[in-house]
Structures are given as C-alpha cells and as structure tokens.
Amino acid sequence: MRSALLRRFGVSAALAMIIAEVMGVGIFLTPAEMSRTLGSTTVVLGVWAMVGLLSAAGALCYAELGTRFPEAGGGYVYLREAFGERCAFVYGWMSLLVMDAGLTAALGVGLATYLLVVLEGPATLVPAVAIACILLLAVVTTLGVEMSSRVLRWTALAKLATIAVLIIAVLVGGGESRATGSAVSMTFPAFPVLAGALMGAFFAFGGWWDLGKMSEEVVEPRRTLPIALVGGIVVVTLVYAGLSVAFMHAMQGRAYASNDAFVAALGSALFGERAGKALAAAVVVAVAGSLAAVLLGAPRVYLAMARSGVFPASLVRFDSRRQSAPRATLVQVTLACVLVMLGSFDQILGYFIPAAVFFLGLSAAAILVLPRPPDDPAIFRAPWHPLPIIVFLVLVVIMVALFAVGRPMQTLIGAVVVALGVPVSGFVVRPGVVASRHTRVRDEP
C-alpha cells in the first residue's frame, strides 16, 4: 500500500507536538494533587525527577528505533520487526480499541469539564460537550497537517506562557506563608500516597511516544527525533517541577480537601474571584492541544496495519494534499464517543493506561531483540546501551503493577479486550503475507 506522507515535521513542530500532547488535562491538577498529598517539596521534586529521568530513558530508545525504522506507526513497526506480525497486530488492535479511543475519550471529558466551568454550565452536559469537542478537533486535524501543526505550536506556547505567569504570581504573592517551609519539606509520605503520586506523574508524562508514529513525516529523523523526544521531556519535567514548587509555596499553612478546591482557591487568592475561570480556560487550551495531537498521530498506526494487510486500506487512504486520513479519524472518534457515554474520566483512565503502558515497554524492548546496526550517519544510537531500556522497563513494570492494584476492574476489562486480539490475529494475519521490511512507502495519488 502506498501513502502520500511527506516529511514536514521539523524540530520545532515535533517539539511542539510533544509539549502539546503531554501537558494536557493533568497540567495543573497533577502538580497540585502531588503538592497537597506528599507534603514535602523534596519528595515532590524527587518524584518528578525520577519519572522524568525514566521517561527520558524510554525516549532515547524510541529515538533510536524511530531512526532505524522511519515509518508511520511507531510501536507497531518496532513490534513487527522484533516480534513478528501477530504481536504487532495485537498492538494495533489495542491501539484501535483501547489506547487511542480511551485517550481521546479521556481528553474529551477533561476538556468538557473545564469548558463547562468557564461557561458555568451544568456537569450533566459533560458527555455531550465532550463529544462535541472531540468532533470539532477531529475536523481540525482532517483539514491537514499544516493546520494541526499551527494548533500544536500555538497551544504549546499558550501553555508555557500561562504557566510562567502562574508560577511568578504564586512566588511573588505567596510570601506570607514562607515561615512554615522547612517543616513542610521534612515530611515523608506513606507508601500508598507515594504510589498514587507516581501513577499521577506517569500519566502527566503520557503521550511523548506518539511522535514515533510520525517518524515517516519527520525531517532529518537522526537529528529531530532525539532532540524533540528528550528535549520535550526535559521541558515538561521542568514545568511540572516549577508548578509543584509554586503550589507548595502557596499552600504552606493552608489545607484543601481536594486538588479541585486547591486550584480554585489558589486562583482566587492570586488574581481574584475570576481566576478560577482563568485557570479553567488555560486547562481548556492545554487539553485541546493534547487532543489535537492524539487525533493527528493515531491514524498512522492504522496506516502501518493496512500496509501489512491487516486493516482495511480504504479506511486509511491519506489525502495527498492535506496529509490526513478522514475515515481513520472517524473510526477513532466513533469509538471514543462510545467510551465517553459509557464511563467516567477515572474509569476511562483505568481502562486504557495499563494496556498502553505494557505495550509501550514491549515496543521499546525491541531494541534488545533487534541486532544493532553499525555506525550509520542516518541512525541515532541511544547512549549507554542497554542501560536506558533496562531503566525504562523497570518503570513500566512498576506502573502496570500499581494500576492493576489500584484499578483492578478497569485494568481487567482492558486486558480482556486486548486478549481478544490474539485469536482474531489468527484469522487476520496470513502466513507469508507480510509488509516488506525496511521499505519506505511513498505517494498515493
């Protein structure tokens, strides 16, 4: 199968995609919740540093794999090359029915929740507004990669500017409570609290790996992928750490029942009664950028599946001018809207995150299975091999275990849906009919 994908994502666009997607619905709530529950600046910064470091280790592996196989599909391609077509199909099945649909639905619900805060609408409208937001941003992404790139750049800049203003305002306006700082920073949380913080931090970093799906459209992958992947994670880590320090500084000597109450009270204290709406509007922009990035990247996996003959090619026919696949996006949006109507935000998270994390680790582990090529100016080689992948797999195992214990029912449902892909692969994946490896497919009229 041929495709009209062109290399249009340079360093700035790729970096904006990572920042826009990662800094989504948890941009304020996760740092606020960690600041509220951990009670220690040192521990908060330690959690962000650890998850950021481990994520950077995974990003190094993805950067190498992305330059070795600069094809649309990311994890699907890496699994196909390392473990075969059947394993790759189960990943694609998981992406279609669990990860992409679940992430789209979760972001839609988060976007709707904050949009209704801004508009002062009732919470009962969340499902309807979420579906409307998903459809609207789906239309934006189908207008073409150029339009999507602009949305990603502007939302990334808006997020960073809003956060900078918030951090400065907190640090400048929170001086009255500094006396209690040393006491707060000396406490150490119980293990369940620390485990919850690790889960929240990992979720807050989620999505950086989606750039791998765009490898076929990245300009100079050898240069762009490592800079965007690792650089994006560094930026996000610094932003989250800065927000957490600001929140810890502002909340010293105060108590809040929930992170929602904390964010609202913080905004009112800094900027007045309208600040709650201002922060909600900032979250709307943040989540909109994340949702646009997810909708842009997901169809590339289905394209890789179609090239392997395990997905209907008619559904992933890319527009040669706009670089979009409207039919594939429609499939993703339809499944996401079903999940919006069936589950709450937390239920949707528990449904897709464990399966997504498991396959993220498995696809990164392809670097251990595939023989490493000799030095090649077109291929980025992850430094200190195999240390980065070992470090990253430790994080993956910890995260899957924590989610399985913390949300057993949703984790089980997601696992069952993924497991159904195994017998289905027996009917879909035909022996001897495999996409030609190491080929670069181009231009469909």
Image (cartoon, grey):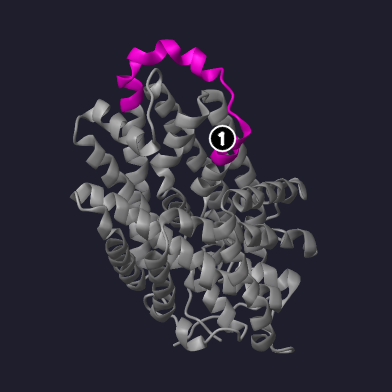
Q: Residue at x 52, y 64 (%)?
A: 99
- Please, is residue 310 above or below residue 410 in the view? below
* Quarter assignment of residue 344: bottom left
Name the element at disc 1: helix
Number of marks: 1
Q: Residue at x 52, y 47 (%)?
A: 205
Q: Is residue 78 visible?
A: yes
Q: Residue at x 23, y 35 (%)?
A: 275
Q: Which residue is mark 1?
A: 193
Relative depth, front residue between 136 and 119: 119
Name the image quarter holding the C terminus.
Answer: bottom left
- The image position of residue 215, as x and y in percent, is 55, 65
Question: How packed is label 1: few (under 14 Cα within 10 Å), some, or many (20 or more)?
Answer: some
Left of 117 or right of it: where is 400?
A: right
Query: From which residue to which does the magenta span run?
Result: 169-197
Task: Specify whether residue 180 is painted magenta.
Answer: yes
Left of 363 or right of it: where is 42?
A: left
Mark 1: amino acid: Val
